[in-house]
């Protein structure tokens, strides 16, 4: 309980909701456009729906019914993932290194559990808050002090490093990395990622690589998986999700790759297989994803599914490009939106001030960067998950609000 008491209540989304509700009450006829929360807005691909229906029909008959499945996932899905997401991109990942789950949120939360509580953890700032909070819950932090927990090594993002953090100056044991990044939309190059893999080798550290937004990578020269980097299999595990890739946020299916070559070390330097630790944890605490969901997930890897998923991603990426172009046109520096559905905008004022300005002057909801860590102050995150019509209207309204501000500044 004492660890949970250290947790700072996250007011981010409840504060956003409070401000939005107050605005709606005061302006009941205004249409609010939400470009804040990172949930998808478009339907599941029809290939997934078809597979889902067929699997549900199987469940309706005693002869084809499925009860408990293998905890790690059905072979048909593990094989489709290993082939479709890794082997076809030159990464030698085998089906039995894939652990199917109901979400990258759970996996990225739970993975730390297999390690001691006295290890040193490096966490980026700004960050997807799950990595921090779960390590606080586990007892790896000191108290909250001046906007940060003591005991963690924070990896600062800034406009100087393009929100790709520098390597830690001290040795650490566990490193969280997320690319394409939530919230900043930044994407790492192969050379930058190689530095992290080398660091992990040199320091016997383990990288927890969150690639939940991998499907949004457009630049062929960028790594879609950490396993495209030589030596990564020994020092990294990777989280993936169908949530944003194929619209599974409400359907729930994700997976974690734990290569058999991946090793952790005891205090005395003894090598331990991370695969066997995670397999033990997963089979003890998890009872697999439902059969129809796994069949729907398998359909993502069919030829039809791949075409539909690409179309889905292109739709959001067209929104992202549009947002970035318009915000830059208005004079704001931006990161992201090129290989990610998030655009990270330098607000030129405090995150919450800019949030209020967009809400009150344009009726547009974004996410204040300060909610993702101290290094997020002064930025906002705009999400591309909405219809193109709404994105277009939001950008028109923001442009209008900016023009009014410029006129006001000139005393007109
Ligand atoms: N990892 C990152 C970086 C995310 O932004 C999200 C969701 O927003 C998740 C993981 C969660 O994915 P899932 O829906 O598979 O739990």
Image (cartoon, helix red, strand yellow):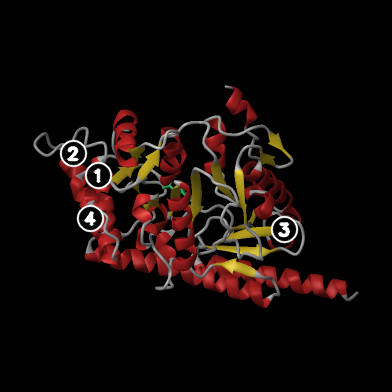
Residue at screen point 35% across, 43% down: 263
Residue at screen point 86% across, 71% down: 408
Q: Mark 2 and mark 4 in contact (Cβ < 8 Å)?
A: no
- Which sits in the foreground, 309 or 333? 333
Quarter of the image holding residue 304?
bottom left
Q: Mark 2 and mark 1 in contact (Cβ < 8 Å)?
A: yes
Between disc 2 and disc 3, whose residue precedes?
2
- Whether residue 103 appears in this view of the structure is yes
- Which sits in the foreground, 348 or 153? 153
Q: Is residue 145 left or right of residue 407?
A: left
User: As displayed, is residue 56 above or below residue 139?
Assistant: below
Compute the Cα span from label 2 to label 3.
52 Å
Q: Nearer the viewer, mark 4 or mark 1?
A: 4
- Whether residue 41 appears in this view of the structure is no
Between disc 1 and disc 2, whose residue precedes?
2
Q: How many marks?
A: 4
Q: Nearer the viewer, mark 1 or mark 2?
A: 1
Q: Which mark is residue 80?
A: 4
Between disc 3 and disc 4, whose residue precedes?
4
Which residue is disc 1 drawn over?
Answer: 292
Q: Which mark is residue 172?
A: none
Which residue is disc 2 drawn over?
Answer: 59
Compute the Cα span from label 4 to label 2.
22 Å
């Amino acid at each position: 309980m004492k660890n949970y008491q250290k947790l700072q209540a996250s007011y981010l989304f409840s504060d956003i909701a409070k401000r939005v509700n107050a605005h709606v009450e005061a302006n009941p006829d205004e249409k609010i456009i939400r470009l804040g929360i990172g949930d998808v807005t478009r339907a599941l691909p029809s290939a997934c729906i078809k597979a889902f229906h067929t699997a549900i029909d199987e469940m309706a008959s005693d002869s084809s019914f499925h009860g408990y499945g293998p905890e790690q996932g059905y072979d048909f899905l593990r094989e489709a993932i290993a082939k479709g997401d890794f082997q076809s991109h030159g990464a030698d990942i085998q089906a039995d290194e894939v652990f199917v789950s109901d979400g990258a949120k759970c996996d990225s939360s739970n993975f730390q559990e297999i390690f001691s509580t006295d290890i040193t953890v490096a966490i980026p700032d700004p960050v997807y808050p799950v990595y921090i909070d779960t390590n606080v819950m586990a007892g790896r932090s000191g108290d909250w002090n001046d906007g940060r927990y003591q005991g963690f090594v924070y990896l600062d993002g800034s406009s100087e490093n393009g929100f790709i953090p520098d390597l830690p100056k001290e040795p650490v044991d566990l490193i969280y990395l997320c690319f394409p990044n939530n919230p900043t939309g930044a994407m790492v190059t192969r050379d930058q990622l190689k530095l992290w893999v080398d660091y992990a080798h040199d320091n016997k550290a383990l990288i927890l690589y969150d690639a939940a937004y991998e499907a949004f990578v457009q630049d062929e020269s960028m790594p879609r998986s950490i396993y495209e980097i030589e030596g990564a299999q020994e020092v990294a595990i990777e989280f993936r999700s169908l949530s944003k890739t194929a619209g599974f946020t409400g359907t729930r299916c994700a997976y974690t790759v734990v290569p058999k070559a991946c090793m952790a070390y005891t205090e005395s330097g003894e090598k331990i297989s991370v695969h066997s630790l995670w397999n033990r944890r997963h089979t003890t605490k998890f009872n697999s994803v439902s059969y129809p969901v796994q069949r729907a997930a398998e359909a993502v890897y069919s030829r039809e599914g791949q075409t539909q998923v690409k179309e889905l991603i292109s739709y959001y990426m067209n929104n992202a490009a549009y947002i970035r172009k318009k915000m830059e046109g208005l004079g704001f520096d931006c990161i992201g939106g090129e290989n990610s559905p998030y655009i990270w905008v330098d607000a030129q004022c405090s995150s919450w001030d800019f949030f209020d300005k967009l809400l009150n002057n344009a009726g547009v909801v974004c996410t204040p960067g300060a909610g993702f860590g101290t290094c997020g102050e002064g930025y906002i995150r705009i999400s591309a998950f909405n219809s193109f019509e709404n994105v277009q209207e939001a950008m028109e309204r923001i442009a209008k609000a900016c023009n009014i501000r410029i006129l006001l500044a000139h005393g007109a």
